[in-house]
Amino acid sequence: MMKASDLFVKALENEGVEYVFGIPGEENLDFLDSLKNSKIKLILTRHEQGAAFMAATYGRMTGKAGVCLATLGPGATNFVTSAAYAQLGAMPMLMITGQKPINSSKQGRFQIVDIVRMMEPLTKSSKQIVNGGMIPSLVRDGFRLAEEERPGAVHLELPEDVATEEVADWHIFPVNKAYRPDADECALDEAKTMIEASKRPLVLIGAGANRKKLFQPLQEFINKTGIPFFNTQMGKGVVSCENPLFLGTAALSDGDMVHRAVAMADLIINVGHDVVEKPPFFMYKGGQRVIHINFNSAKVDEVYFPQLEVVGDIANSITVLTQKLNNKLNNKVGDMLEVREKIKHTIHDLDNDDSFPMLPQRIVSDTRKALDKDAIIALDNGMYKIWFARHYHTYLPNTVLLDNALATMGAGLPSAMMCALLYPNRQVMAVCGDGGFMMNSQEIETAVRLGLNLVVLIVTDSAYGMIRWKQEGQGLKDFGLEYNNPDFVKYADSYGAAGHKVKTADEFIPLIHACFEKGGVHIIDAPIDYRENKKLFPEQLKNA
């Protein structure tokens, strides 16, 4: 005989779970008690949203589903944004929520919300556990669903009375490795023919390519063929920016500078395209042919309709295609590489500007100079995200974490905390706007309590800057987007972290160095001057 909550924890251990992030409640006290005797570590957070952001980032970085815990009602509803974040961002995550007894309850409808139905449109699967004996199969299937392509969120609800059941007959299901099928040989041969026939091919690296180990296969493909490449925001780092064939990042949907090279291309080799990302709109007017190389077939819409689909394991598809192609193709890509030089000159022209408050270009450039090549920055959502997406150089996969799917504010700090927990010997920085930081700033207490080494950079403009930029771009009056901030230095000190305020541009890099050298949690308040945002309007980009 085994108590159902003990069986649940045993099933999690079988999956190799290291952490459970969350806030328990009355309805999952039995689960909490079972967790007490487990090798799994409970990470108690200050808000359920922060817990689930951490769990999702664990999934993003490891490929294994992160696990988070909340009680019923308001605890579970606080998971909603994070569930959508994981689901749209393709991050494997298992959410566990409590519920009142389902066989008998003396509290009527107190706190009862149909969480299972609420989570259904936000997850790959949402189920209530009605029998303790079902726990091992539901947990195994939940992890399978969360982790297989396309990854996402799964929800299991454990009612209070089910958690206390004694289970007589139970079986833990082994975790078996699943192998992805290879692409059809005919599709690879047709891709080879299309590539060899093209005069100006171009590789686009999307979010799906950042989920698996594609660094080496893609680098070999690009180097052998001499085909230039660019990436989406969530495809940053799959191939190093140091490669001379790298053109840049498509940081905007329309009119961005890298789109000049797209307009020149006659063939787009789209590796790891993910429909959640705003696409560089190359489908409706350029006339380019498109090869879709991905785990799954393409979802056709107005801006994406490839002429050839190579469906299967991406790494294997790229490897086989590299072997089939000649060493160097008869391409005319020199004009594309000229675009690269123009882009570099334009986006870095103010890297050394001494004005204060600092310009975005200087903040991004100095942050890159101050950090190691394998440092991880987790971007929250705001205007600075576009500047970092275009200007910040990446050398390794998953060293720039940004959300270009749900594009939610408040995820940057918890995501960085997760990375600091996973990689204690690497530099980790959260980059937040003052608006996004305040949405989950209470998690600074969690970071201090966990003893993390973490630098939090807050770029402050006392406004919702991205919406202000959109407001200006639509010719509307500046209205309704300004607010006041606390003293971030005192705010940091109140949590036991170290607070700093940048007062000149020249002190920014030395301050970052000093924070990492000292260790612990540091908050840097860096005022930003967003007058350069007007350069990101499509008409300005076309003239750059």
Image (tube, rainbow, N blue to C red):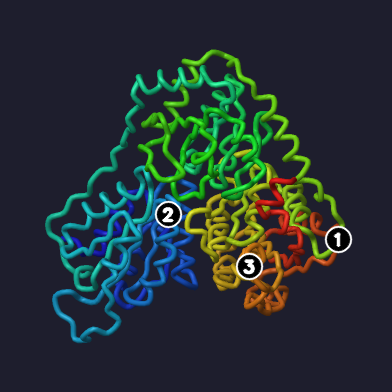
Dot 1: element:
loop
Q: Name the residue rendered at 59%, 52% in the picture.
A: 424
Sooner in the amino-acid sequence: mark 2 or mark 1: 2
Residue 448 position within the rendered picture, expressed as x and y whole percent measured from the top left: 60, 67
Instruction: Residue under label 3, please give it.
Output: 471
- Residue 520's place in the image compared with 74, above or below, is above
* Residue toward you, 27 or 337: 337
Instruction: Residue under label 1, please give it.
Output: 355
Q: How many marks?
A: 3
Sooner in the amino-acid sequence: mark 3 or mark 2: 2
Q: Name the residue rendered at 47%, 32% in the picture.
A: 290
Q: Quadrant of the C terminus?
A: top right
Tell me, yes or no, if residue 78 can be seen here.
yes
What is the three-letter code of the residue carrying label 3? Gln
Dot 3: element:
helix
* Residue toward you, 412 or 404: 404
Label 3 to label 2: alpha-carbon separation: 26 Å
Quadrant of the rendered image containing residue 348: top right
Residue 286 position within the rendered picture, expressed as x and y whole percent measured from the top left: 54, 36
Instruction: Residue under label 2, please give it.
Output: 88
Position of residue 237 in the picture relative to residue 319 (left or right): right
What is the three-letter code of the residue carrying label 2? Leu
Residue 139 position within the rendered picture, expressed as x and y whole percent measured from the top left: 27, 54
* Residue toward you, 262 or 364: 262
Label 1 to label 3: alpha-carbon separation: 25 Å
The mark lying in front, picked from 3 and 2, is 3
Mark 1 Cα-neighbour bin, 10 Å: few <14, some 14–19, many ≥20: few
Position of residue 102 in the picture relative to residue 204 (left or right): left
Residue 79 position within the rendered picture, expressed as x and y whole percent measured from the top left: 40, 67
Residue, far top = 326
